[in-house]
Image: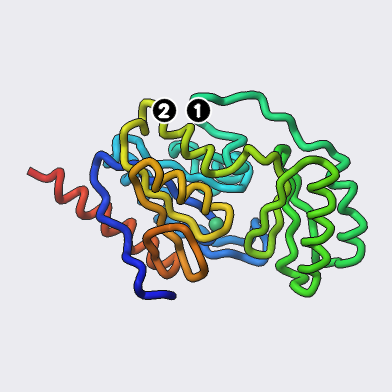
Amino acid sequence: MDETYPTPPPLCGSDALLLDFDGTLVELAPRPDAIAVDPALPGLLGALAAQLGGALAVISGRPLAELQHWLGAELTLIGVHGAEANLPLPGAREIAPLPAAVGEALEPLCRRHPGVWLEPKRYALGVHYRESPGAEEDVLQACATVAQDYGLERLCGKCIVELRHADIHKGAALQRLLQHPRYAGRRPLMLGDDRTDEDAFVAAQDAGGCGVKVGGGASQARCRLASVADVHAWLRAQAEQLDAGESP
Ligand SMILES: [Mg+2]
């Protein structure tokens, strides 16, 4: 990791904390259902949310139901890059599910590479190739073709390509979240590890806050944390210092 990037600023009680899930709060796993969530994590996030007046949210590409399964329903959770949320967001509108034909068009790709599999998420389609890394070029090409055919955006993450409507991304989700009374006027800090978080880093920084890239690689985020373990340590330290600040 490039050590010239600063670590994130200390949290204030008037900040808003926005967190990606996979690769940020939990280590990446070969398959999305194979992650190990630290049993202390939901409690830590709940405590931080209380210290921030409720202004904490997890923003993920996962479906909302999966986030609720792993983290419980108490936290603000935004799924499928903003297409789903358990908090009514200003500017929410009806989003058309992706047509089934998008997945059908990629079935020949999956037949060519047995390790490649599709994750339908109603408003987006994930094409996973972690178990078949040699298929990357074929996956990228096939997804580019399908994206063009159906007017979708292709976003390349860590061993996943996501196809979705162009206006559904974490940056737009963050902007809408900041219009909600619970988050409005707060300095947003957005932590994330992947390409899908870049829009949200920019949105956070445009709103006077800070993007925090987890791990190495090029990023528009101004701050860095090296690993999931460092994210947990930073979160625990913020909870402690906010707690100390509230003590008489
Ligand atoms: Mg991630």
Q: Where is residue 9 in the image (x, y as percent from the top left)?
A: 27, 56
- 10 Å neighbourhood of mark 2: few (<14), some, or many (≥20)? some
Element carrying mark 2 = loop
The answer to whether mark 2 and mark 1 are in CB contact below 8 A is: yes
Q: Residue 114 carries which label?
A: none
Identify the residue position indicated by label 2 in the image: 180
Q: Residues within 10 Å of mark 1 (few under 14, many from 20)?
A: many
Marks 2 and 1 sit apart, C-alpha to C-alpha, by 6 Å
Residue of label 1: 89
Q: Is residue 160 above or below residue 200?
A: below
At label 2, which amino acid type do we have?
A: His
Quadrant of image for the N terminus: bottom left
Amino acid type at image mark 1: Leu
Residue 133 percent across, percent down from the top left: 74, 72
At x 59%, y 40%, the residue is 64
Q: In which quarter of the image is ligand 1?
A: bottom right
Query: Upstream in the sequence, badge 2 or badge 1?
Result: 1
